[in-house]
Every structure is written in C-alpha cells, then in structure tokens.
Image (spheres, grey):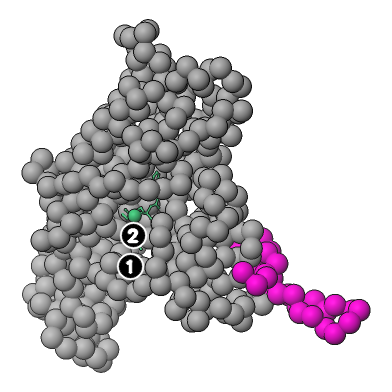
Amino acid sequence: MLLKRQYITMLKLFNTNRLITPVLNKCNHSTAAKSVTAVKINGTEFISDEYTNVTPKIMSYLGKNLHLRKDNPLSMVRQRIVQYFYKSFTHRGNPTFSVYDNLSPIVTTKQNFDDLLIPADHPSRAKADCYYINKDTLFRAHMTAHQSELLRSGLNNFLMIGDVYRRDEIDSTHFPVFHQVDAVRSQRRDELFPNHPDLDIFEPTFYKQKPHLFTNTILDPTKQSCYTLEATKLMEVQLKNHLIGLVQALFGKDIKYRWVDAYFPFTHPSWELEIYYENDWLEVLGCGIVRNEILLNSGLNDTIAYAFGLGLERLAMALYKIPDIRLMWSEDSGFLSQFHNKDLNAKITYKPVSVFPQCVNDISFWLPDNFTIDTFMSNDFYDLVRDIGGDIIEQVKLKDKFVHPKTKKHSLCFSIVYRHLERTLTQAEVNQIHKAIETAIVTAFNVTIR
Ligand code: FA5
Ligand code: MG
C-alpha cells in the first residue's frame, strides 16, 4: 500500500460529494444556507465533508463477505491458510493463533494510519487512494488497520481476515475491493530463546532508559536499534520459513519463489514474497518485523513480533487459474458450482463458463405415495433432465423439500440452470424444454407437478 501511483488522475474522476446518498440536509439558519450531508452506513450516520468520496457502488460491497461464503474460491484459500496456521502452531494441543474474520471494515484514520506510524503526508493516505467516509473515517485500506487494537487487547498470535478497499486501476488483477489475511506473531525473550538464557531480544541500551523514552531508529537496514541482531535474525528466519511453508502447502513443494527487500512504515526490516506464476513474478505478500513503537503503544514492552499481509485474490487466481479478478464476485452458478462441496485440497482448475446468460426455471412436484424425499432417486431425475435438455443444462440443484403436515406427502423443488455455450437462449425456448421435462418426469416417476 505504499508508493501509490496514479492518484492525480483518479482525483479528477471522483472528487465530489454528490456520489453519496444524501440522507440529511440541514440548513444553517444564520447566514447563507449551507447544506450538510451525511452518509448512513449500517445504521450509523457519518457527517460528510470535503474528504468524502465513498460511492454508493462501493458501499454496496459492504457485508458481502466473499471470504466467508461457502462456495467462493477466496473462502477456500482462507480456510487452507487458517488450517496451515492451526496445524503449524499449537500450544498444549490448542491452536496458538486466533482468527478474526468479522471485524468491521469501517475504521478511523488513527487505526488505518496513525497507529501504524504512517506519516501525515504519506501518499497512501491520499483521498485519491482511499475510500473516505469523512476525514476521520474510511473503508480500511488494509487489514493491518486492526493490528494495534488487537495487540492492545492482549493477543499475541492472531490472524485478521477481511475485505479491504482501495481506489486503484481497473483490470483483470485489480478490483476496488479485495481481501487480505494479515497476521501477527509476537514472542517474549523466554519464548524466542528458551534454551539460551544468555541471549536477549533487546540491546542493553534499551534497558538503560524507560522504554517509552528510548528513541528507536531504523537507520540500520538489518534491524531496529532496540532489538539485538540475534533476535531479529531468528524472527526473520521463522517468518520466512512459515511463509514459504504456507505457499508450499498451497502450491506444492516445487513452487518457485524469491524474497524482495521492501519498505513499510510499520515494519523494519521488511520484505515482499513473490512467486513465479505464468512466466512472471507475482507479489503475494508483504511482511516484516513490527516496529517496536507500535508494540510499546499497545502496552507491550518485552516483545518482538513479526507481521505479514497477503492478498487472497492473487493466491486464488494463481491456484485455480482464474483469469479475471471480477469472477470472484460472480453469482453465476456456472462459476460457483466449480467450487461447490469440493475438498479443500483438491486440485481445481477453473473452466471458463459461457459468456451467454443463463436462464433458471424451477420445477416442483409431489412424490407418489410410496416415496419419501430420502428414497427418491435424484440421480435418475438428473439423468432424465439431461436426456431431454442436453448440453444446455448447466446445473440442477435441489432448492427445497417439504412434507405436507396433513397428507404427509413429500414434495421436492429443483432449480434447473439452462445456458447455451454459443448463443443466448430465449425464455420461450427454455420454457418449452422445461415443459417437456415436466411431462417426462410425470411419466417416468409418477410424480405430480405442483
Ligand atoms: C499491505 O497492505 C500491508 N498492510 C501488508 C503488510 C502487513 C506488510 C503487515 C507488513 C506487515 P500491500 O499494499 O503490498 O501491503 O498489499 C499486500 C498484498 O495485498 C499484496 O502483496 C497483494 O497480494 C495484495 N494486493 C495489494 N493490492 C492489491 C490489489 N489492488 N488487488 C489485489 N490484491 C492486492
Ligand atoms: Mg505491495
């Protein structure tokens, strides 16, 4: 989220408040009528100002939570990452890391920037790069926005997963909303060096003053001035090993990767991990040793920590060969069904769905008296549907089942998704095929269409 490009052009496109749904117009009674507009989000009202640039379209992504949706590839990658951390770190049989995947994406500038030592004039704060609700409130631009508050609440090892919002270019790998997994792992001296009472995490000079009076510097590229080189190096090795372990768990042992030196205001030293994918290097995450000032401000004066933040979209696109980031938002069953009920570790290669629109017709029927929902042979039904509909049947899914309270008759409802791969189907021709299926199942299974 550093060194943002392009923010001047974006500013020209979106610099007005009129994109906001006005929910309130107050008049200033004294002089010329001044209108104050507010933005209402999830029931909370925010007074807008010259910073406000969030659009109704962007607001419409709030609460979509793709990372928690069952059939979404982002959710599958999320679960694999969480599993990796649960498996790799346990303490007396319990997972060491706790997971926060439901934190509100509306944060203060303090959370998103100040708490992370991001300077007041840093380009990542630009109105052109972020979606501001007003000058103090924005849609989080990275999951690191929650790092300080979770540290303050006493957590040592945690994952923060959610949607983040950035004004960025629009192409196959960029979308204004994407998803990140962020993490912090912190350790005290006895945890980092359990067998070396002679080693310390802090330089002797750090102890000479009160911790908050110590001036921590990042002039040395290898470490922060407060930490020893041994502690910093050991944390670096652990951090890198854990992250390489993660990409190998996702992509297999043969994945080609490289580390690139990086800069983030909240870590030092910092790195980015790139993987070799489709003949090019792809940046998948940023990481580093957390700046000690952040830990001190959160009440921790005996700790060294590492942190990282990765993008779920990039990993999912590479893992499943999904060519366009917008597909993550697809509600199309032709897309979602490719990830439906799949084993988390199954090798899935995305097959492009037809670009022609689908038609969905439901079919409901009462089963004959001698049948129940459990004894009805759904697979026979699917075959019959395919026999009649042919290749234009994209999916048949059970939508509803019902037992009549009085007659005890059982009823089923299926949605049939029709799509032609080469042309747009008309509703009329779909209705005709659908009717033919109804007629056929009445004969074949003795059911009664509802
Ligand atoms: C950050 O957001 C830092 N907060 C990461 C971090 C956390 C560093 C903790 C150190 C410690 P960055 O802007 O590089 O950094 O984004 C992190 C990852 O999010 C990237 O590596 C990439 O995988 C993903 N990402 C960034 N921008 C986009 C985008 N526009 N579309 C899709 N994925 C993106
Ligand atoms: Mg980056």
Secondary structure that dominates the magenta span: loop
Answer few, some or many: residues within 10 Å of disc 1's Cα (few below 14, many 20 plus, some between 14 and 19): some
| Residue 418, quarter of picture | bottom left
Q: Amino acid at mark 2?
A: Lys
Q: Of 140 and 403, which appears nearest the observer?
A: 140
Answer few, some or many: residues within 10 Å of disc 2's Cα (few below 14, many 20 plus, some between 14 and 19): some
Helix, strand or loop under label 2: strand
User: Are the residues flagged by discs 1 and 2 in contact, CB closer than 8 Å?
Assistant: no
Mark 1 close to ligand 1, CB under 8 Å: yes
Does 63 appear in magenta? no
In the picture of the structure, the residue carrying the numbered disc 1 is: 174
Residue 185: where, in percent of width, then height?
A: 39, 31
Q: Which residues are magenta?
A: 23-51
Residue 270: where, in percent of width, then height?
A: 35, 42
| Residue 28, quarter of picture | bottom right
In the picture of the structure, the residue carrying the numbered disc 2 is: 401
Helix, strand or loop under label 1: loop
Left or right of 85 in this view: 201 = right
